[in-house]
Amino acid sequence: METPAEVLVHNDLLGIKGTKGRLLGVSASGYYEVNLQFGDRRHRTLLPVARTVIIASDAEEGATDLISDIER
C-alpha cells in the first residue's frame, strides 16, 4: 500500500472499528503511523501492527477476478 493513503482502522486497544484515518507510514519497529480524528481534532498515532488492522478505503480494481483464481 502506498503512503500516504486513506484507510479504515480497526484496533482493539483503542476500541475502534472502521475508523477513517490516513496511513502515513509503517515503522521498522512494528508500528503504523496514522492520523486519526478524535472529536474535532486530528492526532498522529502510533498503532502496533500486531493489534491493528488497516484496510484501504478504495477497493482495488479487478478484485472480483481474485476469487476465480482460488483453487478448490
Image (spheres, rainbow, N blue to C red):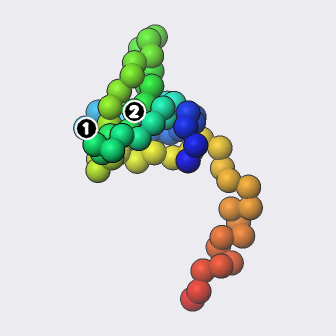
Secondary structure at numbered mark 2: strand
Q: Which residue lies at the image location 66% right of the left edge and 50% below the top edge?
A: 59
Residue that label 1 marks = 13
Please tell me which of labels 1 and 2 falls first in the chain. Answer: 1
Residue at the far left: name it: 13
Q: Which residue lies at the image location 43% right of the left edge and 31% below the top edge?
A: 34
The count of marks equals: 2
C-beta proximity under 8 Å, tags 1 and 2 = no
Q: Which residue lies at the image location 39% right of the left edge and 22% below the top edge?
A: 44
Residue at the far bottom: name it: 72
Residue 5 position (above or below residue 53): above
Residue that label 2 marks = 33
As shown in the figure, which amino acid type bears the numbered disc 1?
Leu
Residue 2 disc label: none
Sort mark 1 into few (<14), some (14-19) or many (20+) by Cα contacts within 10 Å. Answer: few
**Which callout, 1 or 2, points to the residue nearer the camera?**
2
Frontmost residue, 20 versus 22? 22
Secondary structure at numbered mark 1: loop
For residue 36, side relative to residue 48 (left or right): right
What separation in Å lies between label 1 and label 2 (alpha carbons)?
A: 15 Å
Sort mark 2 into few (<14), some (14-19) or many (20+) by Cα contacts within 10 Å. Answer: some
Instruction: Locate the C terminus by quadrant.
Output: bottom right
Q: Quadrant of residue 10?
A: top left
Frontmost residue, 28 versus 51? 28
Query: Would you say residue 72 is visible in this rendering?
Result: yes
As shown in the figure, which amino acid type bears the numbered disc 2?
Glu
Q: Quadrant of residue 39?
A: top left
For residue 43, side relative to residue 7 (left or right): left
> Where does residue 31 sit, x and y in percent of width and height?
32, 40
Q: Quadrant of residue 3?
A: top right
Frontmost residue, 26 versus 34? 26
